[in-house]
Amino acid sequence: MSLICRLVAGCIAIFLFARPARACSVCGCDPAALTVGLDRPSSGSLRVGLEDRYLVKESGEGAVFEGERENRLALRAQYAPARGLVAELDLPFFLWRDHRGAGGFTDDTAHGLGDAQLTARYELLRKGGFVPRHVLAVALALKLPTGANTRLGGGDPHLQLGSGSWDPSVGLWYTFGDHPWTWYAGGVARFNGEGGRGFHYGNAVFGTAGLRRAFFDERLVLSLEAQARYAGYDTSRTSDPAVRAADPDSGGFLGYATSGAAIALGQDLLLRLQLQLPLVAALHGAQSEHPVGFAGLSWDFAL
């Protein structure tokens, strides 16, 4: 597989999962960094990317209604020190994040650094020669509490840019290549920690299966994916240490269809566009999901 194809694969296969909890984007429900489980830069290469995400969502009704609109820009750097190993750093930055209260009006606008994430990817199996037909890889990640978690006194976790918790994830990916087609499937489990004020975002599992096809000597790649996510209820401490209160408008199941296009702009620059459409929902309580759009650029540098 050529360098362009590897670039395309890594960009178009972003994990784009559901956001059924009130503050999923804050707690890191989108495990985009684990895309290295599907593909990787060349050995000894550094891949740097920028990705912009726009989303809108709501939860609750009446006095407990909350809405969110946000534009998040993420800086992603991947380095492959050896053939079977990749390290990655994700730094998300909220260009703006509007919060709407019970009246439906914007009551807070925030911007700044979100929760960074460190990821390592290792190939357990690689068969088929220099251009492998079968690759099985594991990806481990740790989200760090780098985003602000004490805004406006820190009383409402849904007004924060970070969860205030250390959240590990583990993912497993299988890829089968038969040029110009590639088939892939994978899953991720995320285990959220507890924030400083006793708030815990529900643990979640993610799954995806997709295919992509290269055109025009790999200058264009189109992809189609089916994705699913299930998350537990968000909970918080009560006056009784043995009892936790669950947010009734959080968690549940959501299935998406995602289409994407990746276009090579020269030898080492790639443009990626992707649209995620919610199709099947079995969410807890009152929650609304909308299409999510992604646009990104990535560059490869030989070191």
Image: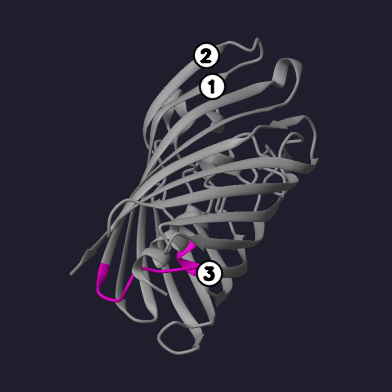
Task: From the viewer's perspective, tell me whether residue 240 is left or right of residue 76.
Answer: right
Q: Quadrant of the N terminus?
A: bottom left
**For the residues bearing labels 1 and 2, Cβ distance under 8 angstroms:** yes
What secondary structure is found at the residue carrying circle 3?
Answer: loop
Report x, y in % for residue 136. Answer: 55, 79
Evaluate whether residue 236 shows in this view: no
Q: What amino acid is found at the position of numbered circle 2 in the picture?
A: Asp
Task: From the viewer's perspective, tell me whether residue 138 is left or right of residue 233.
Answer: left
Report x, y in % for residue 269. Answer: 30, 53
Q: Which of marks 3 and 2 is nearer the N terminus?
A: 2
Please rate how many residues cluster around mark 2, counting C-alpha atoms within 10 Å: few if below 14, some from 14 to 19, many from 20: few
Q: In this view, does 299 lie above or below 129?
A: above
Report, in whole angstroms, how far the alpha carbon at label 1 lies from the one at label 3.
44 Å
Q: Which residue is drawn at 65% across and 58% down?
A: 206
Magenta segment boundaries in residue numbering: 35-45
Q: What amino acid is found at the position of numbered circle 3 in the picture?
A: Pro
Q: Is residue 117 above or below residue 58?
A: below
Report, in whole angstroms, how far the alpha carbon at label 3 lies from the one at label 2.
50 Å
Q: Mark 3 points at which residue?
A: 180
Q: Which residue is drawn at 65% across and 32% down?
A: 290
